[in-house]
Image (cartoon, coloured by chain):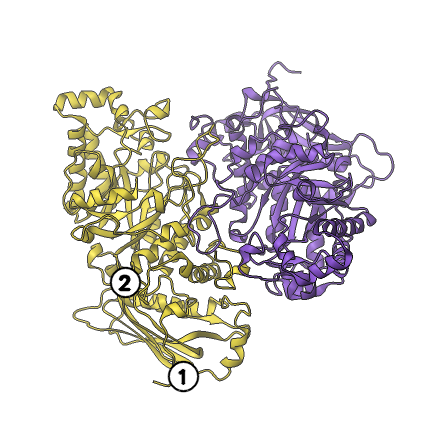
Chain colours: A purple, B yellow
Amino acid sequence: MKASFIFLIVAARPILALWPIPRSLQIGDSLVKLSPDFQIQHSILHPPQDLLDAISRTTERLWSDKLQRLVVDRGESDSRKLLNAPSLTGLSLSLVTTVGPVESIKEEATKEITTRIEGYSLSVPNGGVATIVANSTLGLFRGLTTFEQLWYDDSTGVTYAYQAPVTIVNDSPAYPYRGFMLDTARNFFPVVDIKRTLDAMSMVKMSQFHWHAVDSQSFPLSIPGFPELAQKGAYSSQEIYSDSDIQDIVNYAGAEIDTPGHTAIISTSHPEHIACPQATPWQTFANEPPAGQLRLASSSTTRFTANVISSIAKTLPSKMFSTGGDELNVNCYLQDAQTQADLMSSGMTLEQALDAFTQMTHGALRTIDKTPVVWEEMALEHQVALSNSTIVMVWISSRNAAAVAAKVLRLIHAPSDYFYLDCGAGEWIGGAIGNSWCDPFKTWQKAYSFDPLANLTAAEVPFVLGGQQLLWAEQSSPENLDSIVWPRAAASAEVFWTGSTLPDGSRPSSTSALPRLHDLRYRMVQRGIRAIALQPHWCALRNGACDF
Amino acid sequence: MKASFIFLIVAARPILALWPIPRSLQIGDSLVKLSPDFQIQHSILHPPQDLLDAISRTTERLWSDKLQRLVVDRGESDSRKLLNAPSLTGLSLSLVTTVGPVESIKEEATKEITTRIEGYSLSVPNGGVATIVANSTLGLFRGLTTFEQLWYDDSTGVTYAYQAPVTIVNDSPAYPYRGFMLDTARNFFPVVDIKRTLDAMSMVKMSQFHWHAVDSQSFPLSIPGFPELAQKGAYSSQEIYSDSDIQDIVNYAGAEIDTPGHTAIISTSHPEHIACPQATPWQTFANEPPAGQLRLASSSTTRFTANVISSIAKTLPSKMFSTGGDELNVNCYLQDAQTQADLMSSGMTLEQALDAFTQMTHGALRTIDKTPVVWEEMALEHQVALSNSTIVMVWISSRNAAAVAAKVLRLIHAPSDYFYLDCGAGEWIGGAIGNSWCDPFKTWQKAYSFDPLANLTAAEVPFVLGGQQLLWAEQSSPENLDSIVWPRAAASAEVFWTGSTLPDGSRPSSTSALPRLHDLRYRMVQRGIRAIALQPHWCALRNGACDF
C-alpha cells in the first residue's frame, strides 16, 4: 500500500456521503476518477435479469447524477488534482458461494424477513478495479447502492470520488425490517409517484414498503374476484391500482387491508358487511370520518373478509400481509342490530368474535404461507390469540414496544411519537383551529434519535425486526409526497441499518449525520426526488458552520 | 327576471367556489353552459396589451381548467340537465369612465398602494352575455379572475356554471395590501417557480409580492452598477436573477434589500463594508448564521448602501421598497473596531448612527419617488425618525400592530404568530432536536382567524394597509415551494380582500370557508400549482361530513 494512502476513521472525515453509513468503513483521502471506459462486470453464471437491470441503472447514475461536492468551491480545487489522479476502470461483482441457481434480487428481497441476505463487502482502490462481494444478489444490489453514493462531478464534467481508497467489510443491516408506509386511501397517489418513492427507499437501503392500500375513505385496490370493491369504492375509475400496477409496485412491498375497522367504504359495494356506515355524529362511531366497520360477528362477513385478503395476498410476493386491527370502535358494534343479533346467536362476546374473526383471516393467510401483521391494539388491547409468527406494529407510543416483546411477539417500530411524518400540520377536521393529537412535527433529528432497544431486556431484543416511518395521507397528496417524506424518512433507514454504533465506535448523533443527510438530499434532487432543503444552502456547503 | 331564478344568500349555498369571496354576492341555482362560440369582448378604445393578454389567458383557462365539481357524483347528475341548459355566449368588459388614455393593468397595479382601483361588478345571467364593469383595467382583471372560478366540466366535456345567475356589485378589497413574501436568499428559487407563485397569487387577487431577495447567506440579485454583489455573493452563476429575470418578476412586486443586518454575504465582494463577517460563535453576533452587518456608522458604507438600494429600486415599477431593519445585533458593532472608530470620530451613539444611516437610505428612496418599508424594530425598538410615509411590517407579534399605529405609521400585518409559513418544521440549526422559536405550524385556519383590526382604535384603523403570509426559506426550496405555501396563503388573501363580513352578513369562519378553499386547491392543481390536500378527498366531496 502506498504511503499516500492515509486511512482514517470516518469521524475524522464526516462528510463522506454514505447513507446509511456502513457498519464497517475505512476511507482514505485520495482522488480517483471514473474512467470513460468504466464498466461494471460480474462473474455470475446465469445472472438474474433484475441484477443486470440494477447494474445498468448504477452505470447510468454514475454519469447522470452530476452531483457537485457540498463544499464552498463545489470541488473546483479538486479539478487541478484530478488531472493526475488515477482512474477506476471497472467494478467487479461476485458472489461468494453459488450453490444451485443464483436467485434474483426480488426472490431474496421477498423471503421471510429474517432470512434475507443483504450483506456485502466493497473495495474501491485508488485506481484499477473496484470489487463488490456478497452472498446474495440482494447483497450485490446493496453494494451497488453504496458505490453510487461515492461519486461527484467537477465543473469540467469529470466524475470522481475523493476519499479513496474505500474499504467496507461485511456491511449488513442491524435490523432486517427498514420500511416506509404510505396510505393511498385518504388521498390517491398515482403509480408513478409510488415508484419514485420506491426508488428513493432503495437509495437508503430500505427493505420494505408497507402499502396501506385501502381505508375508510376509498378502496383503490383491484382485487381478483372482487372487482366491485374498487369499482364502487375508488375515488374514480382513474384512481384504481390495476393488477399490473400492483405487480409493478409490490416487488418489495407488503400490503395491508385494514380490518375490521377502517372499512367504511366497503359499504358502497357490500352494505351487508358494514356496521354503522357513515353513522353520525362520526365522533361517536370512529376516530375519523366516515364511520363504518366490518361486521366481525357475522360468519358471512368473516368469510368474505378472509376471501378478500387471501385473494389479494396470494398475488403478492411478500411474505408479510397486514390485517390491520387498529382503532376498533366498540360503540359502532353496540349500535348495530345485526352485530348484536350475531353475537346473541353465537353466544360470543365482542372480544371473542374479534378473536374468531382474526383466527379466520390469519388462518387464511397462513394457508398461503403468509405471515400476518397487525397493529399493536390486537396484541395489547384485545383478547385475541395471536400465533407466535405474528408481527406487531407499535404505533401508539414507542413506550409500548416492550409490552409487545413481553408477549413473545415480534415487532416493528412505527411509533407516532417519532416516526409519523404527517404530524405537525394541524388538525384537518373541519371547524378546528387547534393542532392535532400527534403534534408537533416529527423532525428528522427526532426520528434519528430513536433507540430501537429502549426498555427491552436482552431476551426481548431478538423480537425487534426493525422499524418504519409512515405517511398517513389526510393532508397529503402527490403534490407534497416527496417533500413531506424526504429526506426525513432516511433517518429511520440509518437507525435500523447501522444500529447504535457508527463505524468509528461512536454513537449516532444528528450533528455528525447532518452533512451526510445534506448530501443524500441533494443527490435525491438530482434524481428527480423532490427532497427538501434541511438548511440554507450556505450551511450545506459549510459543515459545522450552522451548528449550535 | 324569470321565476326560476331563486336568489339566495351565499351562506345557504356555501360551496360556490369563489376565493376570496366577493364582498357583495347574489347567486341562483341554475345551470348555464359555456357556448362553444363563447368569446370575451370589450368596448375599450386602445386597450392596453396586458388587458388583452389577461383576456386571452382567461379564455384559455375556461376550457383548460377542466375542474369537476366537488360533489360525490362529480357533477354527473348535472349532465342530464345541461342538455337543455341555456348557454353563455360571451363576456363583455367595459370601463365606466375613460377620461384620457386607458392605463394598463401594470400601471394601475404599481401605483401608490392606497390609490389603486381594483373594484369591479360582474353579472353572469342565465344565458346570453355576461358583463364585467370596472373603473380600471386592474378592476377588469379582478373581475376576470372571479369569472374564471365559476366554471366546471362535466364528464362529457361540457363547461358550465351551476349557480347562475351570479350578481356581484362593486366588489373591491377591504385592504389594498394583500401580499406574499418569498425569501430567495436562504435557498434559491428559479424564476419559473416565482412566476408560478405569482400566478397563484393572482388567482386569489393578492396585490403585492414582497421579494425578500437577498440576505446573509446569498446575494442572488443582479444590481446595475454593482455586478460584483451577485457575482461573489450568489450561490452560483446559475443562481442569479438577471436584469431581465427581475423585470419579469417585479411587475407586481416590491423588493427588499434588508439592511443593516442580514448582509453578511456582502463581505464576499465588499469586505470593507461588513462588520463581524462570519464571526464565531455566530450566536453572539447574529440571530442565525452567518454573522455580518453593514458598518452603519461608516459614511462610505452608508453611501454604498444608499447607492445599491437606489440603483435597484429605480429599475422596479413598485412604489414600495423595503430597507429591512430587523434583528440588528449590537454586539457585532461593539466588537467591530472600525465601527467603534467611526462612532468615536462622529461623536454619535449607535442609535444615532442607525438614524443617520436610515435617513440616507430612505432619503435616496424618496428622491426617486419610492416609499420606504421597514420591519417593526425600526419603529418600535430603535430611535429612528421615520417619515410619516414609511410603511411598517409587523412581524414579531400580532400584538405589536397597535403600537405601530399609535406612532402614526402605516402598517402591514406579517405576524409570525399567524402568517409565518415556515414555522412548525422544527429547528434547523445543526445539533438541535427540539422545535423552533415560532412553532407550531401556522395552519390556514389560524391565518384565517386573523383580525386585522384587533386592539386598534377607530382612529388607528386607517393605518392598516393589509397583510401578508411569508415564506422564510431556511428549510424550503423549489421542491416544497408550492406545497408549503398553497392553499394556506390564500387564507390571508381572503382576510384582507373580504374583510370582517361575508356577503350574507356573517363573520368569516374556517368551517364555512373550507369547501371554497378545497375548490381553490383543486383548481390550483389543475393549473399546475402543487397545492396540497386539506383533507381526505372523501371529505372534499362531502361538505360538512368531516366537521367536528
Q: Quadrant of the C terminus of chain A?
A: top left
* C-alpha span from label 1 to label 2: 38 Å
For the residue labelled by badge 1, is the local secondary structure a helix, a strand or a loop? loop
The residue to which callout 1 is attached is B4
Q: Residue at x 38, y 79 (%)?
A: B6
Left/right placement of residue B407 relative to residue B486 reads: left
- Please indicate, yes or no, whether residue B185 appears anywhere in the rendered image: yes
Tell me the amino acid under the disc marked 2: Ile
**Percent of width and height locating residue B104:** 26, 64
* Chain under disc 2: B
Instruction: Please say if the residues under marks 1 and 2 sit with CB atoms less than 8 Å apart.
Output: no
Which of B323/A339 is in front? Answer: A339
Foreground of the two, B541 or B343: B541
Instruction: Mark 1 vs mark 2: tell me if same chain.
Output: yes
The amino acid type, in three-letter code, at marker 1 is Ser
| Nearest to N terminus: mark 1 or mark 2 | 1
